[in-house]
Amino acid sequence: MINTETALKEAMTGIEGALGAALVDYSSGMALGTLGGNKELDLSVAAAGNTDVVRAKVRTMEMLGLKDEIEDILITLGGQYHLIRLLKSRNNSGLFLYLALDKDRANLAMARHQLKRIEAELDV
């Protein structure tokens, strides 16, 4: 089991092209922890904004009557990937891992795989 700080460090150092990572409570929109980011990538703003994305997708699935779970949400920008992974393990419901990646340096499949592994080990 790893804590929030260790999980974010693993995301930033173990995932090629990582620009910033956060653990977010999407019931409140608050980041429980952040690492990385910069002037152009304010992780607190990203946490709040991506909370709206998650809530909208959950609402849409309910309206459609889909009885499935969201694994992750990918937002592709010109130079970045923004990956949102909803946590389902143990008592982590209502949380998501957010990872911003440099598109030129990142391997999206490996990033998704690594986030899934981090999720499995995370204990909040």
Image (cartoon, grey):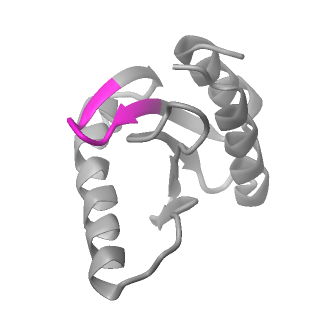
Is 78 situated above or below 100?
Answer: below
Q: Position of residue 120 (x, y in %)?
A: 71, 35
- Find the magenta span and give its range: 22-31
Main SS of the magenta part reads: strand
Is 59 positioned to the left or the right of 4 in the image?
left
Q: Position of residue 92 (x, y in %)?
A: 49, 33
In magenta stretch: residue 48 = no
Answer whether residue 105 is visible to the viewer in this image: no
Is 113 situated above or below 2?
Answer: below
Is 40 situated above or below 72?
Answer: above
Residue appearing at x 34%, y 69% in the figure:
57
Is 58 positioned to the left or the right of 95 in the image?
left
Q: Quadrant of the N terminus?
A: top right
Residue appearing at x 49%, y 62% in the figure:
73
Q: In the depicted view, which residue is nearer to us: 89 or 54?
A: 89
In magenta stretch: residue 23 = yes
Q: Position of residue 111 (x, y in %)?
A: 71, 48
Give the quadrant of residue 54. bottom left
Answer whether residue 19 is visible to the viewer in this image: yes
Is 123 positioned to the left or the right of 57 in the image?
right
* Number of marks in picture: 0
Q: In the depicted view, which residue is nearer to us: 31 or 86?
A: 86
Residue appearing at x 65%, y 30% in the figure:
11
Q: In the depicted view, which residue is nearer to us: 86 or 89?
A: 89
Q: Position of residue 38 (x, y in %)?
A: 38, 28
Residue appearing at x 31%, y 39% in the figure:
47
Q: In the depicted view, which residue is nearer to us: 111 or 26?
A: 26
Give the quadrant of residue 26. top left
